[in-house]
């Protein structure tokens, strides 16, 4: 995934840029970067954050950085920010999203005798492709429009110029950007949770494809938003931070409503409800409150040194981290019928290990209630639930086992309550050794978010999307 943060201020902005970018650390685990602009030009730092926190890696850069304009990024793709010299001037750029037609865009560039200098192992970085598309036009705004028209997938971006920051949300608004304001400064952020402790109030949520220019005096629209919105529903269900809001809708409130919807469709007798940390907690609280059941924590997350299960890029190491970060509490597990809420089941490998631990610690029954439908399609628009094989998805693996092929009758498997849908869910339940497994209904998830379904991207579950 990834997250963006930028700030323009009448005073030095480095400290706010540092903390604001750090508030996006839950969105990515590979690299962090910051760039600030001052009278001498642009200062930049990029660090690997796979084995340490963003704050730790960038703390030593603070004393040498100074400037009133700055952009930061947490990136799971390429090293960013990129600093570009162009006919429009020198600018910095950070991006988040996914370019599905990157190979074609690179081939087109080579035919035009263009070149790319920022490569790793022979691969052109997506941010440089975006910068190349911007530089094809006569102005930054026209260049951003050129990039958004050419890119298949999604790309939100911040440009650091000598006049301030230009913020552009991806064409269909799959990833959010929000402007915050306080006296003497404006900020733009993927996550609004970055604003409160820095003293910012939400001022404007960029619409799909909207382009905004920000300077210390305010912000001005450079391109209006489009009519079609396909914001990623997983923002609320899984990877958004509980204190954030998108389209004015708070994440934690949505998770509570998701849990309540799960409870409304369930009468399974259990002793208490829990949530798989972290994203499952909000769903679990909503479920427990709706059914009048106690909420307890049979798994406690050890956050000081194991903050995120997906930190290492190696799957074997991710599984190790997942096992080490959750500490079981035997006194709450032994002899109990436990119902867990979870944000989703992607591969299921970590959850299977967790369930095994629960039974080893004496659980009588373990019931699982994911807050979204079963994932069947890899994400084509963001770097979430993407893998080398669709069989990495638990749903697609079950379909392959039932059909002898992974791509048969996908629409029927996605239809809640159908014979094939129930067979797929039962196969996943068997694989995970669960007592029962019930997924959220699509209409209940959409209602919990509070936007019309045609304003949400639900491709991961039902294959529905707009490009």
Image (cartoon, helix red, strand yellow):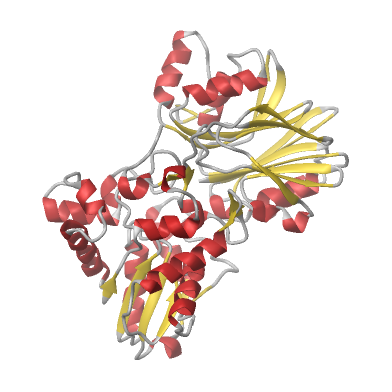
Image coordinates for residue 88, horizontal then vertical, percent: 70, 16
Q: Is residue 261 above or below residue 298?
A: above
Image coordinates for residue 329, horizontal then vertical, percent: 46, 84
**200 to the left or right of 430:** right
Query: Residue 319's image quarter?
Result: bottom left
Residue drawn 26% across the image and 52% down it: 414
Return the residue nearer the eye: 79 or 257: 257
Q: Quadrant of the C terminus?
A: top left
| In the image, farthest residue toward the top | 112
Number of numbered tags placed on the structure image: 0
**170 to the left or right of 6:** left
- Is residue 307 visible in this depiction of the protein? no
Q: Is residue 462 above or below residue 344?
A: above
Residue drawn 60% across the image and 69% down it: 304
Residue drawn 48% across the image and 14% down it: 109
**70 to the left or right of 144:** right
Return the residue nearer the eye: 195 or 293: 293
Residue drawn 17% across the image and 46% down it: 409
Image coordinates for residue 278, horizontal then vertical, percent: 51, 66
- Is residue 227 visible in this depiction of the protein? yes
Image coordinates for residue 173, horizontal then vertical, percent: 53, 38
**221 to the left or right of 385:** right
Q: Is residue 437 above or below residue 311?
A: below
Query: Residue 291's image quarter?
Result: bottom left
């Amino acid at each position: 995934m990834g997250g963006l943060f930028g700030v323009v201020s009448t005073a030095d902005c480095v400290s706010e840029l540092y903390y604001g970018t750090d508030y996006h650390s839950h969105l990515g685990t590979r690299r962090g970067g910051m760039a600030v602009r001052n009278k001498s030009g642009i200062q930049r730092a990029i660090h690997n954050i796979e084995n340490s926190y963003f704050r730790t890696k960038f703390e030593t850069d603070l004393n040498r950085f100074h400037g009133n304009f700055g952009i930061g990024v947490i990136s799971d793709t390429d090293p960013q920010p990129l600093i570009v010299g162009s006919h429009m001037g020198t600018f910095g750029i950070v991006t988040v999203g996914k370019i599905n037609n990157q190979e074609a865009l690179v081939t087109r560039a080579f035919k035009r005798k263009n070149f790319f200098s920022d490569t790793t192992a022979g691969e052109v970085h997506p941010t440089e492709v975006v910068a190349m598309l911007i530089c094809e036009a006569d102005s930054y705004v026209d260049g951003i429009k050129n990039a958004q028209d050419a890119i298949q997938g999604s790309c939100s971006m911040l440009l650091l110029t000598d006049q301030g920051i230009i913020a552009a949300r991806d064409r269909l608004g799959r990833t959010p950007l929000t402007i915050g304001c306080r006296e003497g400064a404006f900020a733009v952020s993927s996550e609004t949770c970055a604003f409160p402790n820095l003293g910012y109030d939400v001022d404007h949520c960029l619409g799909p494809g909207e382009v905004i220019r920000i300077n210390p005096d305010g912000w001005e629209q450079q391109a209006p938003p489009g009519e079609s919105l396909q914001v990623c529903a997983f923002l609320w269900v899984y990877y958004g931070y509980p204190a954030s809001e998108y389209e004015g809708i708070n994440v934690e409130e949505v998770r509570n409503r998701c849990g309540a919807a799960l409870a409304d469709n369930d009468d399974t007798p259990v002793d208490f409800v829990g949530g798989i940390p972290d994203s499952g907690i909000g769903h679990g609280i909503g479920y427990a409150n709706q059914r009048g059941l106690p909420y307890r924590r049979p798994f406690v997350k050890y956050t000081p040194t194991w903050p995120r299960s997906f930190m290492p890029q190696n799957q074997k190491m991710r599984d190790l981290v997942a096992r080490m970060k959750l500490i079981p509490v035997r006194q709450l597990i032994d002899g109990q019928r436990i119902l867990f809420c979870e944000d989703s089941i992607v591969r299921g490998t970590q959850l299977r290990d967790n369930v095994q631990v629960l039974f080893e610690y004496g659980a009588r029954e373990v019931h699982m209630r994911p807050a979204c439908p079963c994932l069947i399609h890899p994400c084509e628009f963001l770097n979430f639930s993407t893998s080398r094989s669709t069989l990495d998805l638990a749903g697609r693996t079950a379909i392959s086992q039932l059909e002898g092929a992974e791509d048969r009758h996908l629409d029927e498997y996605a239809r809640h309550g159908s014979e094939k849908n129930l067979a797929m869910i039962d196969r996943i339940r068997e694989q995970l050794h669960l007592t029962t497994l019930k997924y959220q209904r699509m209409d209940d998830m959409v209602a919990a978010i509070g936007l019309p379904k045609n304003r949400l991207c639900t491709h991961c579950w039902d294959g529905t999307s707009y490009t």
